[in-house]
Image: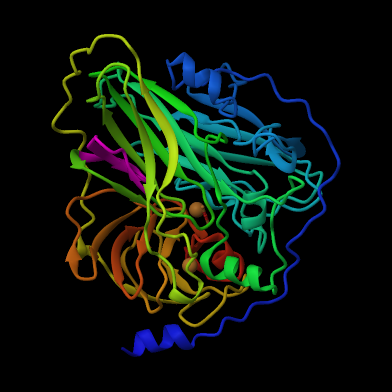
């Protein structure tokens, strides 16, 4: 009850941060589109023009060396209008980075934006100076090299995005995000499955095509701060309502990434059930049959879609309503389902479904008996343990190799997706209810007035690692802390 009261009484304070940055008038020709490697489907290759893959410039085995440049560009995000955006290598979304476990990855990054930025490799286990956190800003005109070795066992779906102090949300809104796929040599799912990558984003525009980013202290700016900025236009791979095709009987492997600053997606494909096979840090031990999946900001899932529809029929992937909001700022149309993409069945006769493995891969248990401490994180609106982030303060200090439990409690009436850099964790329980199956995660949604516990081992990399709410408007205003591992 006290919690509920607090939620109602909380007054949020934030420092004045310049939100609007003048974009340079700078027109870039679109980089020649490389067909997405992950999709054998020509229709999606043709429609998902935004999905490009990095070209590996290295000929050394097990080495991936790529160039990444952040530049202003003028592109058509909303059909029919041009918008001044920020792009990675000239497009939105940025190119997909495809690597294998054990690969050495070197990213030569150049910042051609008129402001500082970083590239954060969300969810990857890598050295501190390659994390792209606010500790390593790249000034305009500067270059930076991100280098890491892809950890064995980390096959999964990740993403990259800017992470400069206070400006992450606006830079992501301007178009800076891209996918990372880590592949395993011994992937248990049949290689014959058609794979699709779906990057879910949303955005909001003014009539002239510019991004709708209200002044922070305006009433609408305040709503964006409370909820996380949501847009009325939903994109899949930078496109509005694209069509994917499937053959009757076919099983497809979908990797879904939520790059939205605030929007959650409660995914459902009416008429179909899905097999949920993986989370942020890769595959589960076995598939789980579900009728819907909730994806909080920054979360990823891998799922198998079974083409149980008739040849020639169609289905729509939807985001069902999910009430993550505090009542005072809940959008009036929050309960409206949203269409994301159309799944069109080909006219080919039904095929015999591929046989799926019952077991995917073992996930080592992080044993609570080995935990040497519990970190308690109390979330309120804009604060963690009543503080805002301070770059010169260490909030949690721990030794390299230690295993610890984090208990994250949300005292307010709005969900907060809690994220930790550098180390994947295992959720133990949510509101005391043990997690049904083990998986690797780097974001855990902590619903209103609930509590989640996870276990983590700080392996291999010393450094200062951010933990924060992944509603970008919250993170940018200091709902973040620093874990120092040494
Ligand atoms: Cu997507 Cu600090 O993270
Ligand atoms: Cu991260
Ligand atoms: Cu939050």
> What is the magenta segment's predominant secondary structure?
strand
* In front of the other: 286 or 227: 227
Q: Residue at x 18, y 50 (%)?
A: 437
* Residue 151 shows up from this direction: no
Q: Residue at x 23, y 43 (%)?
A: 291
Q: Which of the 4 image quarters holds residue 50?
A: top right
Q: Residue at x 75, y 53 (%)?
A: 116
Answer left or right for 470 relative to 443.
right
- Vertical arrangement, residue 265 with respect to residue 331, above or below: above
Queried whether the magenta region covers residue 284, the answer comes back as: yes
* In front of the other: 195 or 103: 195
* Residue 112 shows up from this direction: yes
Farthest residue, direction top: 348
Q: Which of the 4 image quarters holds residue 72?
A: top right
Q: Which residues are magenta?
A: 266-285
Queried whether the magenta region covers residue 38, the answer comes back as: no
Q: Position of residue 25 (x, y in %)?
A: 86, 41
Q: Position of residue 9 (x, y in %)?
A: 48, 88
Answer left or right for 486 relative to 217.
left
Q: Position of residue 398 (x, y in %)?
A: 41, 68
- Vertical arrangement, residue 463 with respect to residue 240, above or below: below
Quadrant into which the N terminus falls = bottom left
- Vertical arrangement, residue 330 with respect to residue 115, above or below: below
């Amino acid at each position: 009850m006290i919690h509920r009261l607090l939620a109602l009484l909380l007054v949020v304070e934030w420092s004045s941060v310049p939100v609007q940055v003048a974009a340079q008038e700078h027109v870039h020709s679109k980089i020649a589109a490389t067909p997405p490697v992950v999709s054998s489907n020509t229709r999606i290759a043709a429609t998902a023009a935004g999905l490009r893959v990095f070209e590996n410039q290295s000929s050394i085995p097990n080495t991936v060396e790529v160039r990444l440049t952040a530049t202003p560009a003028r592109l058509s995000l909303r059909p029919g209008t041009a918008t001044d955006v920020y792009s990675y290598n000239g497009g939105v979304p940025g190119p997909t980075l495809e690597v294998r476990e054990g690969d050495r990855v070197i990213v030569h990054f150049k910042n051609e934006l008129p402001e500082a930025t970083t590239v954060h490799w969300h969810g990857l286990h890598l050295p501190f100076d390659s994390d792209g956190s606010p500790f390593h800003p790249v000034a305009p005109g500067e270059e930076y090299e991100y280098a890491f070795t892809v950890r064995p066992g980390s096959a999964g779906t990740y993403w990259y995005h800017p992470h400069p102090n206070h400006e992450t949300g606006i830079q992501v809104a301007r178009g800076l995000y891209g996918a990372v796929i880590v592949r395993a040599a011994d992937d248990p799912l049949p290689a014959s499955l058609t794979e699709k990558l779906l990057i879910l984003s949303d955005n909001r525009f003014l009539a002239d095509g510019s991004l709708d980013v209200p002044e922070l202290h305006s009433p609408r700016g305040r709503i964006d701060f409370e909820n996380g900025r949501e847009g009325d236009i939903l994109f899949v791979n930078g496109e509005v309502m694209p069509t994917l095709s499937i053959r009757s009987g076919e099983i497809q492997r979908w990797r879904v990434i939520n790059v939205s600053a605030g929007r959650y997606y409660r995914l459902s494909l009416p008429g179909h059930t899905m097999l949920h096979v993986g989370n942020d840090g890769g595959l589960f031990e076995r598939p789980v049959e579900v009728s819907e999946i909730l994806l909080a900001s920054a979360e990823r899932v891998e799922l198998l879609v079974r083409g149980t529809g008739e040849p020639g029929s169609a289905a729509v992937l939807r985001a069902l309503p999910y009430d993550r909001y505090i009542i005072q700022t809940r959008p009036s149309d929050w309960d409206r389902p949203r269409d994301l993409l159309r799944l069109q069945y080909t006219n080919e006769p039904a095929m015999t479904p591929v046989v799926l493995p019952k077991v995917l891969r073992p996930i080592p248990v992080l044993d609570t008996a080995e935990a040497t401490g519990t970190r308690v994180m109390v979330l309120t609106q804009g604060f963690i343990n009543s503080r805002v982030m301070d770059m010169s303060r260490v909030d949690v200090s721990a030794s390299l190799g230690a295993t610890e439990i984090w208990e994250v409690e949300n005292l307010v009436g709005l969900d907060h997706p809690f994220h930790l850099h550098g180390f994947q964790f295992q959720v133990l329980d949510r509101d005391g209810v043990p997690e049904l199956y083990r998986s690797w995660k780097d974001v855990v949604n902590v619903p209103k007035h609930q509590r989640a516990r996870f276990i983590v081992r700080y392996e291999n990399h010393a450094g200062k690692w951010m933990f924060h709410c992944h509603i970008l408007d919250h993170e940018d205003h200091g709902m973040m802390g620093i874990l120092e591992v040494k």
